[in-house]
Amino acid sequence: MVDLRPKTAEEYVRMVDQAIIEIDEFIACLEFDMDDPGEQLKVLNPLLESVREIRKGMADGSYEFANKDLPFMEVANRMSSQLPFTSLLAVINQTHRQGLNIDADD
């Protein structure tokens, strides 16, 4: 299995920022394309807020790596076939659990 974890904190922050953008754009598409995206939004809005909380913790210095899944992983796993950014969330979660990939060869 290829280890896609970022090597630096800056890369990890950019990855979380990318996840926020992708989730936000997915929500916007659903709102535009669907007559009533209510059920999806009940899941996606909390998912977006969870990722934003992680980013906020990174910005204020309170974020900590831990060997446990991030709160959004239950939703990401359950809806993996419906979310185009599931693999990105999985790498963020793997990094959270295992830390940065500082031992990777360039």
Image: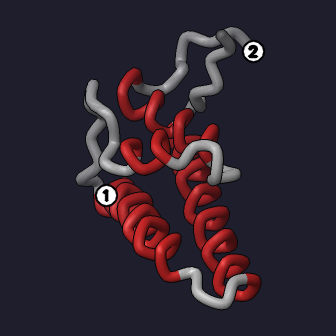
In this rendering, would 87 be left or right of 40? Answer: right
Per the image, the residue denoted by label 2 is: 106
Tell me if mark 2 has few (under 14), some (14-19) or many (20+) residues whose alpha carbon lies within 10 angstroms of its own. Answer: few
Q: Can residue 67 be seen in this view?
A: yes
**Among the 4 quarters of the image, the one containing residue 6:** top right
Amino acid at pointer 1: Gly
**Image coordinates for residue 38, horizontal then vertical, percent:** 49, 82
Residue located 47% across and 74% down the image: 39
Give the residue pinned by disc 1: 57
- Looking at the picture, how far across and down is residue 9, in whole percent? 50, 40
| Circle 1 Cα neighbour tier, 10 Å, few/some/many (<14 / 14–19 / ≥20) | few
**Image location of residue 8, percent across then percent down:** 55, 34
Name the N-terminal-most of marks 2 and 1: 1
Residue 65 vertical placement versus 72 (above, below)? above
Please name the colour scheme applied to the rendered image. secondary structure
Amino acid identity at mark 2: Asp
For label 1, the SS is helix
Front position in the image: 51 or 26: 26
Image quarter for residue 30? Answer: bottom right
Q: Which residue is drawn at 40% across and 21% down?
A: 98
